[in-house]
């Protein structure tokens, strides 16, 4: 029995199990950010050290998501999903035992290897389980709602753990949830594979790692080393060279890590760009705002988590609503709302000071949360729509990779913008130093709004149909079935 042949109740159970992986990954995002000031004090780390605590995870995740998606399509989605859950749980346990910042960063990288096998593979399972377009859009909306719920619980749960048992406790919550998800997957999720295995692309994989690592290293270390220093300029040059080599190399492979033909679809390309902008805004928001609330305003981790709760709550509320809107009228409206919300949140915070009124902070957090909640379902739907079902793992991997690339760049760019502008004592000068970063965040919102208009019209839909036709004509014609590679996600 294939995933799409399951009863409706069984399909909902599969969705719930897949959502567990998203829950622990989303929870990890906000919990770790709430704990950053405590980690910094324990390990005597500056802003750049805290940036690496976040970006070591997101960099590895972004680098391996595409590989994980295609591997799952090849060796089995359930098997890959369970391996990812096990490694994520083990990595989380090791993070809680880290004796120093270097060890914590290393264990975060191990945690990310497991994390790379979770969300894109779970999305592939969902895409192959819910084949009817409207039903699938609702499932994606629920998926987004779970992400919002995990983010909503993260700040408060993180604050409680940090205040009660210390920052190491934030990693403990992943272990029992991971074990439960492994057992439930073994019992209820059927195995599925793409009908035709994709070959590995080691050269493409290495180029992606070099491109991202060099770029993020240059952005994080730029304020301390100097933006025009030889080391930083060399990082940017290496990153640009890796990108040029990747663009030149990948089209020559029969089965590349990144199929550049996907980008001929305007909705697909737009979704990638929107994901990068949205999650760059989120990564920068969480890093800078957490440091501001705890180290400038002097709030406890728990109270800082309560302050962030309005943003996370709006994300949880708007994510399933966005899925319904996408299923009914398409992606344009939620993307416009997303862009407007993120822009408004950034512009309000661009005048941040040590004594900014709590009401102003709450209004900005609400606006940002609405924007973030509205953006997830359109990204996922636009990424997989028009793609062959057999490549669902790859398409889902591209969507998740885009999110993680955005988060890495946001932490690096917005955090470094604040670090570069900081003069004098941290507590007195950090609020003013964040202003440029908030304008960058608002710029991400403007880009989302503009791209939402551009890639949701008739011209964009025509490019998606043309891309689907191109991909199907290149697919093998044998072994037609429900999982036939020439079938597309509607």
Image (cartoon, rainbow, N blue to C red):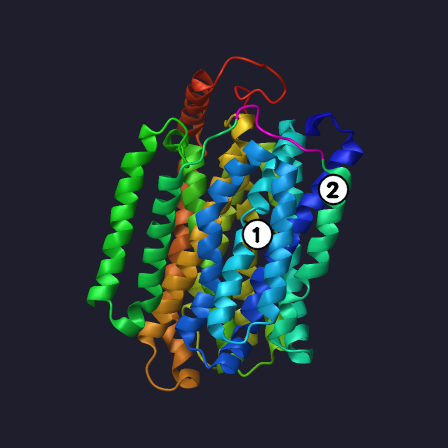
- Residue picked out by circle 1: 114
307 lies above or below 120: below
Residue 362: x percent and y percent? 57, 68
Q: Is residue 416 magenta?
A: no
Q: Is residue 390 left or right of residue 160?
A: left
**Is 309 or 132 nearer to us in this picture?**
132
What residue appears at the point 56 percent right and 58 percent down from the top-left corner? 111
Q: Which residues are magenta?
A: 190-196
Residues packed near mark 1 inside 10 Å, few (<14), some (14 to 19) or many (20 plus) = many
**Quarter of the figure with residue 234:** bottom left
Q: Quadrant of the N terminus?
A: top right
**Is 32 or 303 nearer to us in this picture?**
32
- Residue picked out by circle 2: 186
Marks 1 and 2 sit apart, C-alpha to C-alpha, by 17 Å
N-terminal of the pair, mark 1 or mark 2, is 1
Residue 435: x percent and y percent? 38, 70
Q: Is residue 392 left or right of residue 159?
A: left
Q: Residue 242, labelled with which disc?
A: none
What residue appears at the point 57 percent right and 28 percent down from the top-left corner? 194
Residue 191: x percent and y percent? 68, 33
Q: Is residue 280 left or right of residue 333?
A: left
8 lies above or below 415: above
């Amino acid at each position: 029995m294939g995933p799409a042949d399951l009863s409706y109740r069984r399909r909902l159970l599969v969705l719930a199990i897949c959502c567990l992986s998203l829950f622990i990954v989303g929870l990890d995002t906000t919990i770790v950010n709430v704990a950053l000031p405590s980690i910094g004090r324990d390990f005597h780390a500056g802003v750049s050290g805290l940036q690496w605590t976040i970006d070591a995870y997101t960099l590895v995740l972004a680098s391996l998501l595409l590989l994980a998606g295609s591997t799952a399509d090849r060796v089995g989605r359930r098997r890959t999903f369970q391996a990812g859950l096990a490694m994520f749980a083990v990595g989380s346990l090791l993070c809680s035992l880290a004796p120093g910042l270097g060890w914590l960063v290393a264990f975060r990288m191990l945690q990310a290897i497991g994390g790379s096998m979770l969300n894109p593979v779970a999305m592939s399972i969902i895409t192959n389980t819910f084949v009817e377009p409207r039903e699938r859009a609702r499932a994606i909306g629920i998926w987004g709602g779970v992400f919002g719920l995990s983010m909503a619980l993260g700040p408060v749960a993180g604050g409680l753990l940090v205040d009660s048992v210390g920052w190491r406790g934030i990693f403990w919550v992943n272990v029992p949830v991971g074990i439960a998800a492994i057992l439930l997957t073994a019992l209820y999720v059927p195995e599925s594979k793409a009908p035709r295995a994709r070959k590995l692309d080691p050269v493409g994989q290495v180029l992606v790692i070099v491109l991202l690592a060099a770029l993020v290293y240059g952005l994080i270390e730029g304020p301390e080393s100097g933006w025009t220093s030889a080391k930083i300029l060399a990082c940017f040059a290496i990153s640009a060279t890796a990108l040029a080599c990747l663009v030149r190399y990948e089209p020559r492979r029969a089965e590349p890590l990144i199929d550049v033909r996907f980008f001929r679809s305007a909705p697909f390309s737009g979704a990638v760009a929107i994901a990068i902008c949205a999650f760059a805004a989120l990564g920068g928001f969480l890093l800078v705002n957490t440091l501001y609330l705890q180290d400038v305003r002097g709030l406890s981790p728990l109270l800082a988590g309560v302050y962030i709760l309005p943003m996370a709550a709006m994300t949880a509320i708007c994510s399933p609503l966005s899925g319904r809107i996408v299923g009914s009228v398409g992606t344009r409206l939620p993307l416009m709302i997303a862009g407007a919300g993120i822009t408004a949140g950034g512009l309000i915070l661009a005048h941040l000071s040590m004594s900014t009124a709590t009401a102003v902070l709450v209004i900005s957090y609400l606006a940002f949360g609405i924007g973030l909640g509205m953006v997830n379902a359109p990204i996922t739907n636009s990424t997989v729509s028009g793609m062959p079902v057999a490549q669902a793992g790859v398409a889902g991997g591209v969507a998740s990779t885009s999110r993680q690339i955005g988060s890495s760049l946001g932490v690096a760019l917005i955090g470094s913008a604040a670090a570069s502008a900081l003069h004098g004592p941290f507590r007195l000068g950090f609020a003013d130093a964040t202003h440029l970063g908030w304008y960058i965040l608002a710029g991400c919102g403007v880009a989302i709004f503009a791209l939402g208009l551009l890639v949701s019209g008739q011209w964009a839909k025509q490019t998606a149909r043309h891309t689907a036709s191109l991909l199907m004509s290149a697919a093998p014609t044998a072994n037609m079935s429900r999982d036939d590679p020439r079938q597309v996600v509607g």
